[in-house]
Structure formats: structure tokens, C-alpha cells
Amino acid sequence: MMNKLEASKLVLRLVLGISFLLHGIAKFQGGIANTAGWFDSIGIPGVIAYAVAVIEVAGGISLIVGLGTRAVSILLGILMLGAIFTAKLPAGFLGNGTGAGYELDIAFLAIAIFLAVNGSKMFALDGVLSKTQQKGQVA
């Protein structure tokens, strides 16, 4: 029988993973130099845009496959806090007509916190790797 809690955690893990993967890809497709320029324009060193995009893509993939869910969720949560406090806060929760608000960032942050605290084992590579390591150990 399927555990409802684990199934729910899987849904959250996949939603967060796919969302970050697509946001990271969009940064590269839109021209990562443009994203770096935008970072510079708001007072953040442009080189950080490259790190953020890589973390979003790699973190998204990691969540989708269930590899390092807790650690990746912490890292993505930190990215969300950074986005909220450096770029989105002035626009307000829903945005003020000049840009997107931070409502989506808050939702992503909440999911990241949940996954960091609870993990997600269903259809996760972490579980497969853990079982493989346990079989390789001698008692």
C-alpha cells in the first residue's frame, strides 16, 4: 500500500525540482550574460548569476531523481531567501506593477524547508544508494 505522506513528499520534491530546473535553464537560454548584467544592476556581483543558474539546474535534477534531497533543499532555500531579500522585497508580495512579487519565492521556500526537514524517500536515488552501501558492508 502506498504511504500517503511519502507520496505527498514525492509530489513536492518533483514540483520543486522541475521548477528550479526550468528556472535555471531559462537563465542560460535567456543569455546568462544578461542575467549576470541584471544581477550587477541590482548590486549583486554578476558572477553570482552563473553560480545560481548552475545550482538551480543541478539542484533541480538532484531533486527530481531524489539525490541529496535534504542538502539540496537547504541550498535552494538559501537561494530563495537571497532572491526575496535582494530582488523581490521592494516589489511587495504580489508585485507592484514593476516586477514580480515574492509570493512564488515564499512558496518555493516553504517547500524547500519542508523537504529539508522531512526528506523524501519514494522513488529516490538516495534510497537505492543507501541499500547498495548497506549490502556492501560486512557485519
Image (cartoon, rainbow, N blue to C red):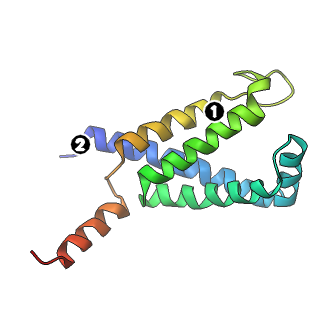
User: Is 74 or 126 nearer to us in this picture?
Assistant: 74
* Residue 94 placement, left or right of 69: right
User: Considering only vertical position in the picture, is 105 above or below 55?
Assistant: above
- Mark 2 vs mark 1: in front: 1
Circle 2 — which element? Answer: loop
Label 2 CA crowd tier, 10 Å (few <14, some 14–19, many 20+): few
Amino acid type indicated by mark 1: Leu
Q: Residue at x 63, y 36 (%)?
A: 81
Q: Quadrant of residue 36?
A: bottom right
**Identity, as a three-letter code, of the amino acid under mark 2:** Asn
x, y percent for residue 93 = 69, 21
Of helix, strand and loop, which one carries label 1?
helix
Which residue is identified by label 2?
A: 3
Q: Residues within 10 Å of mark 1 (few under 14, many from 20)?
A: some
Q: Quadrant of residue 50?
A: bottom right
Q: Residue at x 56, y 37 (%)?
A: 108
| 133 vs 98: above or below | below
* Label pair 2/1, CB-CB below 8 angstroms: no
Query: Which residue appears at 27% of the width and 66% of the height?
Result: 130
Of the 4 image quadrants, the one containing the C terminus is: bottom left
Q: Which residue is mark 1?
A: 104
